[in-house]
Every structure is written in structure tokens, then in C-alpha cells.
Amino acid sequence: MLKIAIDAMGGDNGCAPIVDGVILALKQDRHFTAILVGDKKELLPLIPHKFQDRIEIHESSDVISMHDSATDALKRKESSAYKAIELVKKGEAHAYVSAGHSGASMSLATLRIGRIKGVSRPAIATLMPTVNGTTLVLDVGANVDCDAKNLNEFGIMGRIYAEDVLGIEDPLTGLLSNGEEESKGNEVTKEAFKLLETIPNFVGNVEGSDIFNGSVDVVVCDGFVGNIMLKTAEGVADTIGKIIKQNLRRSLVSITGAVLMRKVFKKLKLKVDYAEYGGAPLIGVKAPVIIAHGKSNAKAMKNAIFQAIKAADSNMNTHIEDKLKIKS
């Protein structure tokens, strides 16, 4: 039975939505055990009696807050994040999930769990909504400065994650650039283009709009560009939602139209809701690590746990190591 280590104290809204998410996941999947790491006095009253035999609690006396430096995470050995990562490192858990300090989770996972052989830098991936599904984008924040070799590794890791975890057969992979032509891009992306050409179903350069139109399954970029793209997309989705609400209140016709289109609006909301996707996997470390949004509600935590389970159940890491061995 899989065991998932969860930093129960790191989220913006305390441990309640995290525990609620764990309960939702346990209700839907009977084949894993949750290990909550945090303050037992706070956690135990939140767990219904019938689930207590499927939830372990590991005591921790420290919490890494969003205002703390990620570089201090390795020194904070009593923190919930450190202790949860250590459970994975020791083989006592198969995966790690946290809605806490993302930088701390990345540092701890990379340095304590370790990288897959052949991976120079792990990457954070995220799922972006498209008309008919999602696009996996990496990196979106772990590596601000990348060289062509890093981008090539991201392409390999992203393709394998799409196949093994997302279940996409023969995923199409593109390199994010300022134009589709091979001549476009900076020196790093031009060099990366040549390396990525050896990946099956590499479609070449893609533009920002291609992330959302469903024409590609995996998009590769450095963490600087990817993080700006991610936050811009979140801002646009939020603004569109506010504009729609403001205009719907202005007339009886608009209100009537909104009532008739409520199913359409519901589907739109689901598409842009981060809770539907759970969290962002840190790909390239030796065990599944899922970094959830700090404001994650119970639904988001449930889906983050399911991401971790899918990754732990797959042969993703073995396939990444094999592919990188061939490339070298």
C-alpha cells in the first residue's frame, strides 16, 4: 500500500483544508495511507474516528512560513516540511505533498531525496487549461537561468510525465519561443531546438497562444519565462471572471442570459480553477513531489494527493533515467 507524506502545516489557511483534502482522497481511494506531519494537538481533532486507522501523524514542532528563506529549510530539521521529506528519503513514504513554502520543498527534495541519475536540474511542471484538455508546461519557476542542456532534459522529462502519469499517447512537444520559425528565439533556445529535435513528436518552436489552443501537449521553457507565463495566465483568468460578473449585473437581459448559460459558466470555471489540477509536480527527483498552491482548498489537496499517487504508481523515474542515459 502506498504511503503519502503530507506537510500538514505549511498552507496559507492552516491545517484544516489540508486534512479535509486528505479525508476526501481517502474516501475515493482505499489503496493508500496518509502520513500527516505536523502538530498532533491540532491535527487529531480534525480527523474523523473512522479514518484514524488510515492516517498516521508524525509530530513536528516547527513550520516554515512563506516569509522564511528557502535556504534555511535544510537547517530547520524539526519543521513539518523537513520531516515529511525525510520520510520519503528513508523509504517510509512513497511521495510528498505540500501546500507550504515552494522554495523550501524544492530545496529539500533536491538535496535530501536527490535527483534522478542524469538530471542536472529538476523542473516544476504545471497543467494549463486548453479547449479540449490541458498542456503540461515546464519549467515554471525552479530554474530562472537555464542552458540548452537543461531545456532538452525538461523536454524529455515532460514527455515521459505526459505519457506515464497523464496517460497521453505520443505527446507532442514544443519549445516556447517568440515565433514558430526555427530561426526565432535567443541563443539558448536555438541551441536547445537542435537537441530537442531528437525527441519523438517534437513540433519545433511554439508561441504563447499554443499553450492554450490544444495544439501541443508539452511546452518547454526556462523557469523565468514559465513563471511569468503562469502568473499572467492566472491574472487574465481572474480578470475575465470579474469582467463577466460586472457586465452580467448591468441589465435584466444579461441576468437572463447568465441563467440560461449557467452550465457554460460552470464549465469555464472548472477549466480555470487550479483546484481541478491539484498541484505542480517537481519532476527530476527520485520520488514524486507535488507542490500545491498555498491557498489550496480541500479539493485542491485531494487532487494533489491523487497526482502523487499516479506518479508513485508509474515507472516515470526509471523511464527518465533510461532516456537520459541513451541521450548521453
Image (spheres, rainbow, N blue to C red):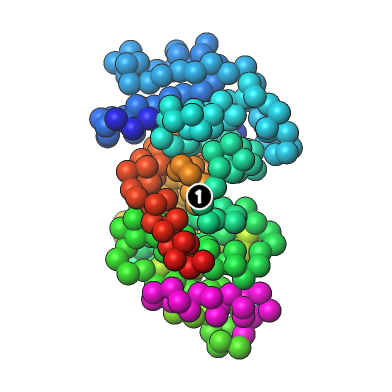
| Residue 28 makes an appearance in the image | yes
Per the rendered image, the range of residues in magenta is: 184-202
> In front here: 173 or 136?
173
Q: Position of residue 90 (x, y in %)?
A: 48, 29
Going by the image, does 185 lie left or right of 165? right
Q: Residue at x 51, y 33 (%)?
A: 89
Image quadrant where residue 189 sits: bottom right
Secondary structure beneath dot 1 equals loop
Q: Is residue 21 above or below residue 240?
A: above
Residue 191: in magenta span:
yes
Q: Quadrant of residue 86?
A: top right
**What residue sits 59% from the left and 64% below the top?**
150
Q: Where is residue 257 drawn, in percent x and y?
A: 37, 62
The N terminus - image quarter: top left
Q: Is residue 306 magenta?
A: no
* CA neighbours of label 1 inside 10 A, class few (<14), some (14 to 19), many (20+): many
Q: Is residue 102 visible?
A: no
Q: Position of residue 3 (x, y in %)?
A: 37, 30
Give the residue pinned by disc 1. Answer: 116
215 over 232 or under it: above or below? below
Of residue 226 and residue 161, the one placed in the foreground of this image is: 161
Q: Residue at x 62, y 70 (%)?
A: 148
Q: Residue at x 62, y 78 (%)?
A: 191
Q: Nearer the viewer, residue 295 or 253?
A: 295
Tell me which amino acid carries mark 1: Ile
